[in-house]
Image (cartoon, helix red, strand yellow):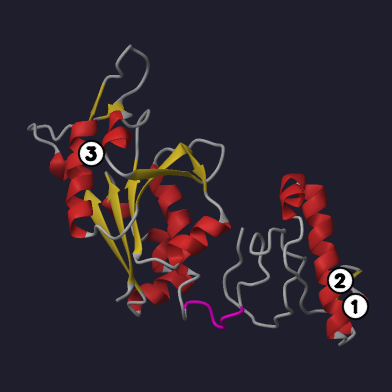
Amino acid sequence: MSWAATVLTLYPEMFPGPLGQSLAGRALRERTWSLDTVQIRDFATDRHRSVDDTPAGGGAGMVMRADVLACAVDHVLERRPEAPMLVMTPRGKPLSQRLVRDLAAGPGVSILCGRFEGIDERLFEARPIIPVSIGDYILSGGETAAIVLLDACVRLLPGVMGAPTSGEEESFETGLLEYPHYTRPPMWEGRTIPEVLRSGDHAKIAAWRKAMAEADTRSRRPDLMERHGDAPRPSPSGARHEDEGT
C-alpha cells in the first residue's frame, strides 16, 4: 500500500501544485504515494455553504466554524483512521526533520488547512488533531504549509531519491546544517573549489565537511549547535540527488 495524503481545504485546485513536479511528481505518477483532497464547503449545511463566522468577543476577520470542520474531519477519520490528522497553524508544534521522518515512516497523513483568522478552538478539544507549524510567520492559509510538509515527507519515501543514502548528510538530518557544496568548473570568477575537495582523500574530505557543517551551524543557527551535542558523525556519501533541502 502506498503512502497516502488527504488534504482538507477550501482550495482543492491548489493541489498537487508543486507536488506534481520533480521527485514528488514522479513518485505520484508511479503511485509511490497518493494525494486526495476534500472540499470543506461540501460539509456546510446552509445554502451559502458558509464555513466561517464572526469571532466571539469581537475583532477583525472571520473564524472557521467548529461544526462544519468537525463534519469534514470525521469524514476523513472514518475513511482513514490510521493516518494522523494534522492542522497547519502558526500556533502548532514546529515542524522538524525528526517529525518528518516519523510521518514518512507511517501510513500517510491527513492535513486540515485553515483560512481566515483561524479555527474555532473547540475543534481541537473535540477531535484528535495535531497542530503543526512550519515557522514563525503568517501565510494566507494552510495550503502552502501543507505542500511544504508533504514535500518533506515524500522525498523520504523508499525509492523517491536515487540512493538510500542520498538524504543522510543534508541539513538537520544529523542536527547540523549541511556543509557547503561545489561543482565544476573548478575556477569561477576567480573563486576556486577548496583544495581538500580535489584531493581524493575521503577521510580528509569527510573531516572538512563535518568541520564546515559545525562552523556554519555555530554562526548561522547557534540554537541548533546547542542542541547538537554528540550527534553521530555522518558517513561520507557520494550520492547525487535532484532536489535541495531548505
Secondary element at image label 1: helix
- Above/below status of 77 relative to 174: above
Task: Please state the total of marks drawn on the protein image.
Answer: 3
Residue 176 appears left or right of 155? right
Is residue 197 at least partly visible in the picture?
A: no
Q: Earlier in the sequence, mark 3 or mark 2?
A: 3
Secondary element at image label 2: helix
* Spatial separation of the CA atoms under disc 3 and disc 1: 57 Å
- Residue 236 is situated, as x and y percent measured from the top left of the image, at 74, 79
Asked if the magenta segment contains residue 163, the reply would be yes
Q: Earlier in the sequence, mark 3 or mark 1?
A: 3
Q: Which residues are magenta?
A: 160-165
* Spatial separation of the CA atoms under disc 2 and disc 1: 8 Å
Residue 227 appears left or right of 82? right
- Residue 53 is situated, as x and y percent measured from the top left of the image, at 24, 24
- Above/below status of 178 relative to 162: above
Q: Quadrant of residue 113?
A: top left
Q: Residue at x 27, y 52 (%)?
A: 12
Q: Residues within 10 Å of mark 1 (few under 14, many from 20)?
A: some
Residue that carries the numbered disc 1 in the rendered image: 196
- Above/below status of 77 relative to 116: below
Residue that carries the numbered disc 2 in the rendered image: 208
- Give amino acid for label 1: Val
- Residue 209 is situated, as x and y percent measured from the top left of the image, at 81, 70
- Above/below status of 88 relative to 186: above
- Give amino acid for label 2: Trp
Secondary element at image label 3: helix
Residue nearest the observer in this picture, 186 or 58: 58
Specify the label residue 69 is tagged with: 3
Q: Residue at x 76, y 51 (%)?
A: 225
Residue 126 appears left or right of 101? left
